[in-house]
Image (cartoon, rainbow, N blue to C red):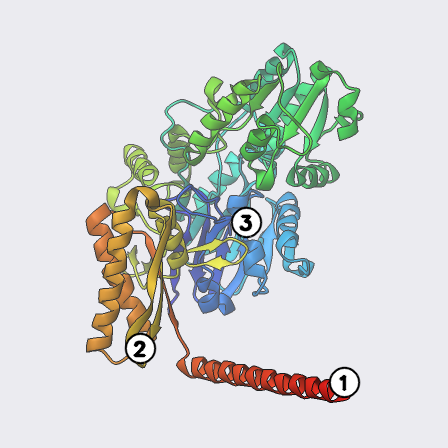
Amino acid sequence: MADQIKIMILSGVREQGKDMFAVQVNDEIFVLDAGLKYPDSSLFGIDVVIPDLDFFEQYGDRVAGIFLTHGHADSIGALPYILRKYDIPVFGSQLSIELAKIEVQRENKRRKNSLFHVIDADTEIDFKNASISFFHTTHSIPDSLGIDVHTPAGEIVYTGDFKFDPTAALNYRTDMDRLAEIEQKGVLALLSDSSNAEASFPNASEQDIGKFVTNVFRNAKGRIIVAAKASNLNRVQEVLNAAAATGKRVLLTGRDLAKIVRTSMKLGYLDVPEGLLMRVKDLKTVPDEQTVILETGRMGEPLNSLQKMAKKRHSMITIHKGDLVFIATTPSHAVETMVAETSDLVYKAGGTVIQLGRNIHTSGHATGRDLQLLITTLKPKFLIPVIGEYRLLEVVRDLAIKAGMNPKDIYITKNGDCLEYDFKQKRFFLTDPVPGEDTMIDGSDVGNIVLRDREVLSDDGIFIAVVTIDRKKKKIIAEPKVTSRGFVYIKANRQLMSDSIDVIKKAIQANFEHKKFDWTELKQDIRGDLEKFLYKKTNRRPVILPVVMEVNQNRHRAMQKRNEKAQNDNKNHAKDENKKTKINKKKESNKKD
C-alpha cells in the first residue's frame, strides 16, 4: 500500500489559543497539543472553549497519542474533556505531564495515570509508521518542547509556543544544535508559532525583565500586589527573586498558583528561599512595605480578582491607599479593555498600577526576526503558519517570502482543513475536511443555538406573550397579556404593548380560521407576526416567548356540577335544620300547655 501523509488543522489558526493539530501517517494519527482558550465578551456565560471533540469520535481508534509541547492551558486545557471518554496515551515533559494531571483531576477525579508518559528532549518514540522526537524550546514555562514527526517523505516539525533567547536559563533555552540536526534530515513541513509575528522589536531578555521587576520592588513604598498567570513560571520565579533581593515576603493566593508552585518546587523548577512565603494570618504582623501578594485568580486569569480587591469584595485582600498593583504579564488583545477597567478601579481605591508590557517589550512568542531565523535554520519545503489570528498568519507568510521561500509553498489554513501529501507531484493539497468547530463549555457543552439566543437576549431583550384559548370553540378566553425585559420601557410604550395584543389576537384568529389546530404552528404564527411587528416599530428583534394555555371545558363543567351539587346539599341541609327547629318549638309549646 502506498504511504499516506496528512496534516490536520483541528484548531488554533485564525484565533489565539486552543491549539490542536494532527499528523496522519498511513493508519496512525499523532495529535499535537490539546488546548483551550478563554472566551471573549461575545461568548455569553461560557467558561472555556475547546476544539471539536467529534474528531475523536470519528478518528479516535487511529490516534496513537497526544503529544504536548508545554504546560499552559492553550496546550493542555482540552485534555480533561478528551480523556473523559477516550483512553489515549499522553506524552510530555515531566512538568507538562504534572500540570496536565492537575487539569485532568479538576474535571475528572478518576483520571488514569497509566495514560500519562514522561519524555524529554532526548526521547525518540518509534511507532509502526513514524517516529516522534523532541527538542528544547524557549517559552515562559520550563521544559517546553518542539515536536518532530519523522515520516517517509521527511520531517514534519511543530514548534509549539517558542522564542529565541540566548540568555535564557538552561531549562528555557531553544536547542539550536538540535534544529540543525533536524534540517539535515530534510524538513518536509514546518508548523510554526505566529502569535507575535507583528513584533518589530526584539523581546527583552529574561535577565533584563528580572532586573526591571527587582527595581519595581525596590522603589515601592507600600504593599505590592502582583497579577500574573499561574502557569508563567518564569515570571513567578522573577517575582520570588525580586522579593528575596529586596527583603520582602510573599503571600500566594489563588488555588491554581498554590498547586502549580508546589508541583514546580517538588520537581525543582522553582527556587523558593526558606522563609520567603507567608500565610494569610501573617498579613497582620508583616509591615506593608515588606509584603508582596502574588495573585493569579481563577484559572490563571488575575484581573477579576484585582477588581474584587478594588471593590472590597475579595475574601482576603482589599486594595487601599499606597498599594502598588504590578501587572506582570502582557495581556492579549481580548482583555486589554478589562485591564484598563481594572486600572481605573485600582486608582479609585487609592492604589497605583504598573504594567510590565507598557515599560518593557516582553512575550513568550517569537518575533518576526525569530521566525525568519527559524525558517533559514530548518529550510522547510513547506510552511504552515499556526497559533495566531488571520492577519498574523499572513505576516508570517510575508516574512517567509522575504527569507527566500516560494509563496506557493506557504499554506494559510483554517480550522478543519486537511492537507494531504501527493508523493508524485511532491506537494500538499486540500482533501476532505476534518471536524474543526468550537466546543463551548459552561459546566456542560453548549451549542451555537444556545449561544445565539444569549447574544440576542443581551442585545434586544425578551418579549413574553401569554394568552388563554378554547381550541374547541376556536376563541380566545382571556385577554392576552404582554410584558418584556430588556426590550422597551413599558410605561413609555403603552401603545406599542396595546398594539402587540391586537397582533396576537389576529394571529390566533387567522390560525383558527385557516389551519388545522396544531400547538407548534400556533406559537410559530404568534412569534412570526410579533417579530415582524416589533421590528417594524422598533428596529429590534427581541427573543419572543409565546405562552399559550388552554382552558379545560370538561373539567370546568365537572367543577360546576360539583359546585351546584354542594349548593343543593347545603340548601337541603338548611331545610332539614329549619324543620327540626320548627318541630322543637312545637314540642316546647305543647309542654307549656
**Viewed as shown, does residue 128 lie left or right of 196?**
right
The amino acid type of the residue labelled 3 equals Gly
Indicate the secondary structure of the residue bearing disc 3: loop
**Horizontal relation, residue 29 to residue 100: left or right:** left
Q: Which mark is residue 421?
A: none
Q: Nearer the viewer, mark 3 or mark 1?
A: 1
Q: Residue at x 46, y 33 (%)?
A: 365
The x and y percentages for residue 446 are 46, 58
Q: What residue is rendered at 66% in x and 18% in y?
A: 223
Q: Are circles 1 and 2 on residues that touch, CB within 8 Å?
A: no
Task: Tell me the residue that label 2 is attached to.
Answer: 518
| SS at mark 1 in the image | helix
Q: CA distance from mark 3 to mark 1?
A: 103 Å
Q: Which mark is residue 592?
A: 1
- For badge 1, the amino acid type reads Lys
Residue 53 at what x, y percent from top left? 47, 61
Kindly report the distance in space between the C-alpha atoms of the residues bearing marks 1 and 2: 77 Å
Q: Earlier in the sequence, mark 3 or mark 1?
A: 3
Is 278 rendered above or below residue 561? above
Q: Position of residue 541 (x, y in %)?
A: 28, 51
